[in-house]
Amino acid sequence: MKLDVNVLRYLSKDDFRVLTAVEMGMRNHEIVPSELVERIASLKHGGTYKVLKNLLKYKLLHHDASKYDGFRLTYLGYDFLAIKTLVNRGIFTGVGRQIGVGKESDIFEVAQEDGTILAMKLHRLGRTSFRAVKSKRDYLRHRSSFSWLYLSRLAALKEFAFMKALEEHDFPVPKAIDCNRHCVIMSLVQGYPMVQVKQLQNPETIFEKIIGIVVRLAEHGLIHCDFNEFNIMIDDEEKITMIDFPQMVSVSHRNAQMYFDRDIECIFKFFRKRFNMIFHEDKGESDETEVDENSRPSFYDITKDANALDRDLEASGFTRKEQNDLDKFIEGGVEKSEDSDEDEDEESDDKEQTCESNEEENVDELKSLQLQEKKSSDGVEAEVKLDDTEKGENSEDKDDAVSDEKEEEDDPELVKQLGKQRRRAMAAARGGRKSQSSRNSYKDKGGRSQNSKIHSNMSGW
Ligand code: ADP
Ligand code: MG
């Protein structure tokens, strides 16, 4: 998926308002009925129709009319909401190049006002495994239901919480800066994943250091569970940083020993293969470095404090309930499939999806948008101008946000539905229909009124 942040420049506050309305609707609808979007966004003069069209054009929303007329966010739409929130908070001002593509994440550089570069990790749980989620649907239905939005947000929250807690206990991890929705902002690690390193000055020292981290993690009650050459970064001074924490488990997990041994085995295997290290257990006669036979630590011999990091983790906002939900997903047998198909969630049953903790933020954002709206009455004109600008520059960049989404604009059914919706909205605006109760709850009462400098800020990149 391409994250074309230039699109941000062409999005008006009304666009964000409707995007936020869809996000809120997704708390309990997989596909949010058009009427609900319209009601939550409560744009004047039936403006929602035009905005929806714009959002579909940029693939920030997906239209679904299979059961009823409705919309859902795409990953790109979710990305933009997170980015805008973080920009508004002053965490960074621009998005730069992509520096990593993980199994279920995309990593970008972002820049702060003073030029400091940070790393932004956008979690994409379900991107590679949605088929697996679907195949486990029975399993999931018995618990609670999950959406990619919720799962990705949990993964980000967990990663952020663990990174912070680990940092506080002097583990070599990136500095956790902030987190919103499925997005984690952290310091940029100067270095490369170990998998790219062909030579080390002192492989034994690095090996011992890395094994030492796994052991110390266990002493603090944790197992990384994906501790390998892809998730260990090393710089020119051979300083180690570990990354990637959404899958970490407690030493009290029923499979803890297996996970621990697997992490250790990954390191042994890598150093054996890449740096020709020979371990005692290899029993090979060789004149190459031999590492002490006690190097392979035993899980049972480690004094483990299963609660050592609990307080820090709770303090970071990652509670047991969230841990349980994420565990259920991960342990629900999510075999990685190579299919990259966000649209796998099209099957719309009425499963409940939960993204509660975004609600306050959403309301704040809507309040803020309404305040901005009061200040500026020329929103519609501005939007038209932006549309015009876009046509020339930006048309080829918005492709594969969601690979198989059709050009909704050309969809006659959609045009018809949107037309209907617009007429309804117009009627409502003229007073033909009572305004809905939810509208008042988003009225500005002096809420956070952040600037909307995102357009100019992002344009620097
Ligand atoms: P995933 O969970 O998808 O595997 P990772 O957190 O492992 O994602 O990140 C994927 C890649 O992105 C890493 O291998 C690394 O190259 C790069 N990366 C991740 N975080 C950082 C960071 N803080 N600084 C620099 N590069 C990073
Ligand atoms: Mg990784």
Image (spheres, rainbow, N blue to C red):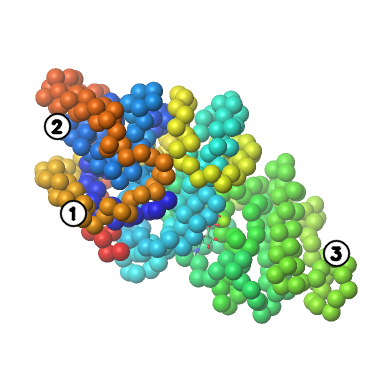
Splitting the image into 4 quarters, where does residue 264 fall? bottom right
Residue to which mark 2 is pinned: 45
Per the model, the C-alpha gap separating discs 3 and 2 is 75 Å
Which secondary structure, mark 2? helix
Whether the residue under disc 2 has CB within 8 Å of ligand 1: no
* Residue type of the residue flagged with mark 1: Thr
Q: Are marks 3 and 2 in contact (CB under 8 Å)?
A: no
Residue 192: percent from left, percent from top:
55, 69
Which secondary structure, mark 3? helix
Residue 15: percent from left, percent from top:
25, 42
* Residue type of the residue flagged with mark 3: Glu
Q: Is residue 255 visible?
A: yes
**Vertical relation: 268 (above or below) 248:** below
**Of callouts 1 and 2, the N-terminal one:** 2
Residue to which mark 3 is pinned: 281
In front: 414, or 213? 414
Q: Is residue 319 visible?
A: no
Per the model, the C-alpha gap separating discs 1 and 2 is 24 Å
Residue to which mark 1 is pinned: 389
**Of callouts 1 and 3, the N-terminal one:** 3
**Vertical relation: 168 (above or below) 45:** below
* Residue type of the residue flagged with mark 2: His
Give the residue drawn at x 26%, y 61%.
Answer: 459
Whether the residue under disc 1 has CB within 8 Å of ligand 1: no
Which secondary structure, mark 1? helix
Q: Please rate how many residues cluster around mark 3, counting C-alpha atoms within 10 Å: few if below 14, some from 14 to 19, many from 20.
A: few
Give the residue drawn at x 79%, y 65%.
Answer: 295
Q: From the viewer's perspective, is 46 left or right of 200?
A: left
Residue 399: percent from left, percent from top:
36, 49
In front: 108, or 435? 108
